[in-house]
Amino acid sequence: MTPRLRVVDSITELRPGLDAGCLAVSGSHGGISSAQYAWAARPLLAVFNDAGVGKDRAGLAALPFLQGHGLAACTVGHHSARIGEARSTLDEGVISHCNERALALGAAPGQACAALIERLLGGAG
């Protein structure tokens, strides 16, 4: 079955129980607070903004957290997409960091977010 695409400016818009298994493309930072919302919703893949990575890699904290809960997650670079704007993440974002589960889905640093999502939706991209 093809996963459903959810493009949400804030990861808090995901709905636990209803969005399980979706491809969640967000404008949210990849911090731990965002990770907790993704964990509750259980998407197949959650895409965040790395927000410049930040002190102690706080902008990437979602990746190992979600990996530990069996969920794929990646970030796009803050220079490639506007923070807080999911459409920018999808249309312009370039993947900057991935957890192992995201790598297993075919995500890779340097890849266009749009190409990854198109492939996961069953397109040629």
Image (spheres, rainbow, N blue to C red):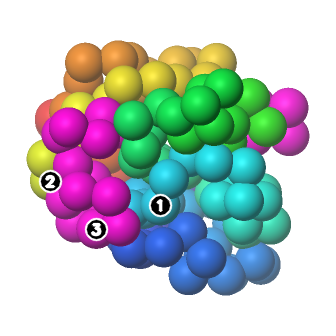
Q: Nearer the viewer, residue 79 or 108?
A: 79
The vertical placement of 16 against 113, above or below, is below
How much space separates mark 3 and mark 2, taking CA atoms?
10 Å
Q: Is residue 65 part of the magenta span, yes or no?
A: no
- Out of 76 and 15, give the one closest to the viewer: 76
Read off the residue under disc 3: 85
Whether label 3 touches label 2, CB < 8 Å: no
| Residue 118 in view (yes/no) | no
Residue stretch in magenta: 66-90
Secondary structure of the residue carrying numbered label 1: strand
* Distance between the alpha carbons at the discs numbered 3 and 1: 8 Å
Specify the amino acid type for callout 1. Answer: Ser
Is residue 85 found inside the magenta-colored segment of the image?
yes
Q: Point out which mark residue 91 bears.
A: 2
Disc 1: which residue: 28
Residue 10 percent location from the top left of the image: 48, 73
Q: Residue 93 in the image: x percent, y percent?
A: 22, 43
- Find residue 105 and report its horizontal and vertical position in percent: 51, 27
Q: Earlier in the sequence, mark 1 or mark 2?
A: 1
Asked whether disc 1 touches disc 2, contact meaning CB atoms under 8 Å apart, the reply is no
Give the residue type at disc 2: Asp
Q: Amino acid at mark 3?
A: Glu
3D distance between C-alphas at marks 1 and 2: 15 Å
* Horizontal relation, residue 117 to residue 29: left or right: left
In percent of the image, x 72 and y 66: which residue is there?
Answer: 37
Query: Is residue 46 in view?
Result: yes
